[in-house]
Image (tube, rainbow, N blue to C red):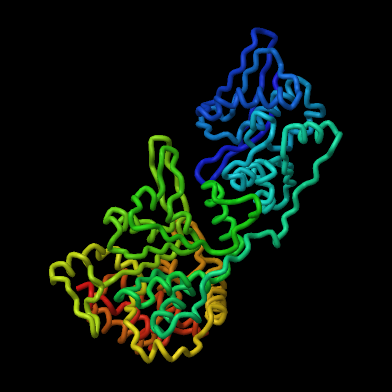
Amino acid sequence: MISYAYTAGLFGIDSYEVTVECHSDTKLSVFEIVGLPDNAIKEAKERVKAACINSRLPFPDKEIIVNLAPADKRKEGSSFDLAILISILSNTGILENSHLTKDCAFIGELSLSGDIRRVNGALCMVLASKQAGRKKIFVPYENAKEASVVSDVEIYGVKNVLEIIDHFNGLRPLTPTVYEPCLETAKQTYPDFKDVLGQRGAKRAAEIAAAGGHNLLLIGPPGTGKSMIAKRLPSILPEMTFEESIETTKVHSISGLLDEHTSLISTRPFRSPHHTMSAPALAGGGKIPMPGEVSLANNGVLFLDELPEFNRLVTESLRQPLEDGKITITRTAGRLTYPCNFMLVCAMNPCKCGYFGHPTKECTCKPNDIKRYISKISGPLLDRIDIQIEVPSLNYKEMSQGQATESSAQIRERVNKARRIMQERFKNEYKENGSPITCNAQMEAKHIRKYCTLSPICSALMEKAFNTLGLSARGHDRILRLARTIADLADSPEIESNHIAEAIQLRGLDKKYFK
């Protein structure tokens, strides 16, 4: 006799349906799992048997062969435990009305006591099960809120094996978990921009960066507010779309960063790794490739404080993800692609001591030391940073005035308005790789030609800047993207000369620091 149960396996942030086939025969007592299982799945034999016994369910004294199909695809993780148990109980008749499981999927890890433990990537697996046509999906109780985000399927959060048995036997039917938007991740409270004194230019640059999704470099002496401004960026980032929330939640789900109270990530992530991190930690990796910081910052901000202190291999590994918005990790276990549409925000001092170019404090670095320090940031990486702004020291008058400045809520209102303009503009536009465009920073060459047309006056100003600053083709396009964002913030349908001029000023550090 053969019985079936359905579950799903993970492959990066994507997932695929797995059919669990169970065959039993009255021979010697043997329990085998085939279908390219890893060690965690092979150990499921002991977990399943113990869970049966401790749940006071008879475990069949037969030859049991469980196959995980498709058998040519390697299966990894402990989320198959529950489906294996259901297939065995259906095969032996312990699970009555087992025909009702045909449109069901089962996801979860078993404890020895019969409890069902949470798993990583539940949202991804539920989406795959829905795509395969399963209408009822049983997940660990702690994953239920996360899984309930998926529409048009019934999600059942179960705590132990007996709850499922009683449900199908008609003794105690389970109630589906209903998605409630109020259970979304509570919006984090970030520091407010009203606490930042002075630095009007840097705050304006942060607003433009947030509105258009542009990369930002803040450079200046110690104590001028570079990190202070960067850490307040999340408070003015635009609201996430539902599609962005789903994609971000999937990445955090497979990384094990969601708790049982989180159904959907609704605030843009802000990642700030230490400068001692390795390249695999940034890009992602491991025997089974897992998302790195660039993917965990997807649809949010990746902040690198003290940029020159990062290993050169680490910073150079950012070049391809910044261009493509995704990263492919190849290991012996397979090749996986993760999304990484993030804003890169960097802060740095102009030299090792930090006071090169300071109006009052003398720099103690030698010229070669300054050159060596600045040269840690490569030209190709700098070319990918749209906004490069100096954060100068404040004088006593600016510090002591204590005048009220704009709050993050006021700035965010303008940012949201500009982002809505962009979303309307790009609602039918896609990148060459097929991913949708959501902001100006993601425009490719064909979109720049379409949406960044210049008047003769603006074109002449752009030509002068191109020749004076020695811009590359990429630098030229990035100035046009910036100008488009500045025009959107001003609610202007056309790019005007003052928009071009401001965009050029936001890339004005090349001659002073990066010669």
Residue 418 percent coordinates (x, y): 53, 78
> Is 383 on the left or on the right of 79, as rendered?
left
**What is the number of callouts on the image?**
0
Drawn side of residue 196 relative to residue 375, left or right:
right
Identify the residue at horizontal 50%, vertical 31% (top origin): 74
In the image, farthest residue toward the top: 27
Q: Nearer the viewer, residue 117 or 213?
A: 117
Does residue 13 sit above or below 73 in this rendering? below
Query: Residue 377: horizontal and vertical position, in percent?
Result: 26, 64
Residue sitting at x 45%, y 80%: 196
Q: Residue furthest right?
A: 171
- Front position in the image: 464 or 206: 206
**Residue 81 in picture, x, y percent from top left:** 63, 31
> Looking at the picture, how far across and down is residue 324, in whole percent?
40, 58
Residues 145 and 260: in front is 260
Quarter of the figure with the C terminus: bottom left
Task: Answer with the quarter of the image where residue 477 lies.
Answer: bottom left
In the picture, the quarter occupied by the N terminus is top right
Say which residue appears at 22% left-offset and 76% top-offset: 356
43, above or below 144, in the image: above
Figure check: 83 above or below 494: above
Residue 16 in the figure: left or right of residue 295: right
Q: Nearer the viewer, residue 444 or 271?
A: 271
Residue 14 versus residue 488 in the image, above or below: above
